[in-house]
Image: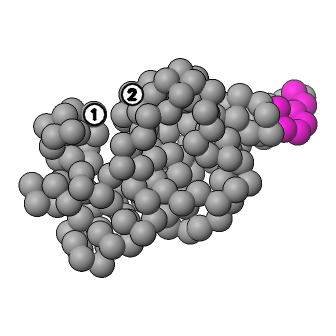
């Protein structure tokens, strides 16, 4: 993979990187081919890498309820690089796909040795998370309004709906 092909898929991130930082990031990413049906993140289990979707589609489920499909250009596992903890969803390949993994150790190394790159990565992860938090707040406000208007919602299906809309509307 070249800087140019990476920049076409991840424009916003790549546009902010110096050539040297871009090369360092590309050197740290591990390409992983994923077979249809293969699970790459398991709900409740620790996540040890940021995943960037290169091609293909992945299904996101919460409590066995499908909440989203994500495709090329999407980020997954971003919160875990900032705050290790259990995954909030299961992610499995809908079809064969390719993801790029930035392992936690590689992320930590980049943050230590390449402060400019670390700044860009942290700002990008913060942007993704902030956008998802804002979207979640809006979705929850919508659900609360529906409840006030006499439409009841109860339980996992509605939470899964909020999660699905959050992933669909959030940055990819």
> Which residue ends up furthest to the bottom in the rendered image?
112
The span picked out in magenta is: 151-157
Image coords of residue 3 (percent x, y): 15, 43
* Residue 68 appears in the figure: no
The image quarter in which residue 8 lies: top left
Name the residue carrying label 1. 9
Image quarter of residue 165: top right
Residue drawn at point x = 45 percent, y = 28 percent: 97
Seen as rendered, the residue at the extreme top is: 95
Corner quadrant of residue 19: bottom left
Q: Which residue is drawn at the image coordinates 37% and 65% (left, top)? A: 106
**78 lies left or right of 1:** right
Q: Position of residue 47 (x, y in %)?
A: 59, 57
Q: Say if mark 1 contacts mark 2, CB within 8 Å.
A: no
4 in the magenta segment: no
| Prevalent SS, magenta region | loop
- Up the image or down, 126 lies above or below 13; here it is below
Of residue 143 and residue 105, the one placed in the foreground of this image is 105
From where the camera sits, is residue 137 visible?
yes
Q: Nearer the viewer, mark 1 or mark 2?
A: 2
Q: Identify the residue at image location x=70%, y=35%.
A: 61
Q: Quadrant of the C terminus?
A: top left
Image position of 49 (left or right of 162): left
| C-alpha separation, residue under disc 1 versus residue under disc 2 | 9 Å
Kindly identify which numbered label has been placed on residue 55.
2
Quadrant the N terminus occupies:
top left
Q: Secondary structure at mark 1?
A: helix
């Amino acid at each position: 993979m070249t800087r140019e092909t990476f920049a076409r898929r991840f424009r916003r991130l790549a546009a902010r990187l110096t050539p040297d930082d871009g090369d360092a990031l590309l050197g740290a990413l591990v390409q992983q081919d994923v077979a249809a049906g293969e699970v790459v993140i398991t709900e409740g289990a620790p996540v040890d890498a940021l995943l960037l979707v290169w091609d293909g589609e992945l299904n996101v489920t919460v409590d066995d309820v499908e909440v989203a499909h994500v495709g090329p250009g999407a980020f997954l596992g971003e919160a875990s690089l900032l705050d290790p903890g259990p995954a909030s969803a299961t992610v499995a390949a809908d079809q064969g796909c390719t993801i790029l993994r930035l392992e936690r150790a590689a992320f930590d190394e980049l943050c230590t040795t390449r402060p400019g790159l670390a700044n860009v990565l942290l700002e990008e992860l913060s942007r993704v998370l902030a956008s998802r938090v804002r979207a979640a707040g809006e979705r929850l406000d919508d659900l609360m309004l529906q409840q006030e208007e006499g439409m009841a919602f109860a339980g996992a299906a509605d939470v899964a709906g909020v999660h699905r809309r959050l992933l669909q509307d959030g940055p990819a």
